[in-house]
Image (cartoon, rainbow, N blue to C red):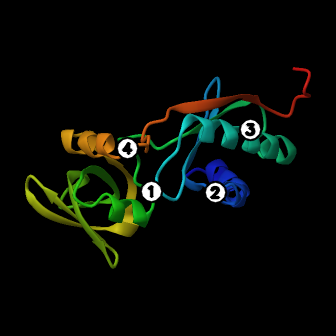
Amino acid sequence: MSDVATRITDLIGPSVEGLGFELVRVTYGGGRRPTLQVMAERPDGTMNVDDCARLSRELSVLLDVEDPIDGEYMLEVSSPGIDRPLTRRKDFERWAGFQAKVELREQIDGRRRFRGRIVSLADDDLTLETEEGEAVLPYADVIKAKLVLTDDLVAVAQAQEGRPLNAGAVSGGQRSGENSEA
């Protein structure tokens, strides 16, 4: 996580939780039009478009007041989606049995990237069932992980009536230190 994303996470975390949501991931990408992406969900895993819009409005006000980023940027609030990132221990536990892609900080057996079915997250080890067999990965070395879109995952998403797993995103528009007339 970048320094900006860490700073934003610390700043908005209490407000996000106070509104009844959990932060899944915060990213900040530079470039011509930098974007601050806030990914969140309710404790039960749901997140609809109205939730995204409400959270976007609340965070927009907070970020305008605190002004933690120099210059203009776009605020985007979204749900994790069906092929969601796995960023917390509880994500790996909740999605055990499903396929995931995992990237490690350090190589194990000559590789940093693994793909397989999540078997367990016990103690400090993440176990995946890969095509080559069982891979036991140090959880502390996981730098990126996400679910793989499979027929099984789609079937579960469709079976969870009233639980939209991919509600899209709401952009809060430009953010910067400029006055409100802009």
Residue 174: where, in percent of width, then height? 74, 27
In which quadrant is the C terminus drawn? top right
Of label 2 and label 4, which has the lower sequence position? 2
Say which amino acid is labelled 4: Glu
Q: Nearer the viewer, mark 1 or mark 3?
A: 3
- Dot 1: few (<14), some (14–19), or many (≥20) neighbours within 10 Å? some
- Dot 3: few (<14), some (14–19), or many (≥20) neighbours within 10 Å? some
Residue 94: where, in percent of width, then height? 35, 61
The residue that disc 4 covers is: 161
Residue 118: where, in percent of width, then height? 24, 59
Say which amino acid is labelled 1: Thr
Residue 160: where, in percent of width, then height? 35, 46
Q: CA distance from mark 1 to mark 3?
A: 24 Å
Of label 1 and label 2, which has the lower sequence position? 2
Return the residue nearer the eye: 170 or 140. 170
Task: Answer with left or right where residue 39 lies relative to residue 164.
Answer: right
- Taking the view exactly as shown, the residue that stands out farthest to the bottom is 123
Residue occupying the point 39% across, 59% down: 91
Return the residue nearer the eye: 109 or 103. 103
Task: Answer with left or right where residue 128 lies relative to residue 167.
Answer: left
Q: Nearer the viewer, mark 2 or mark 4?
A: 4
Residue occupying the point 69% across, 54% down: 19
- Secondary structure of residue under mark 3: helix
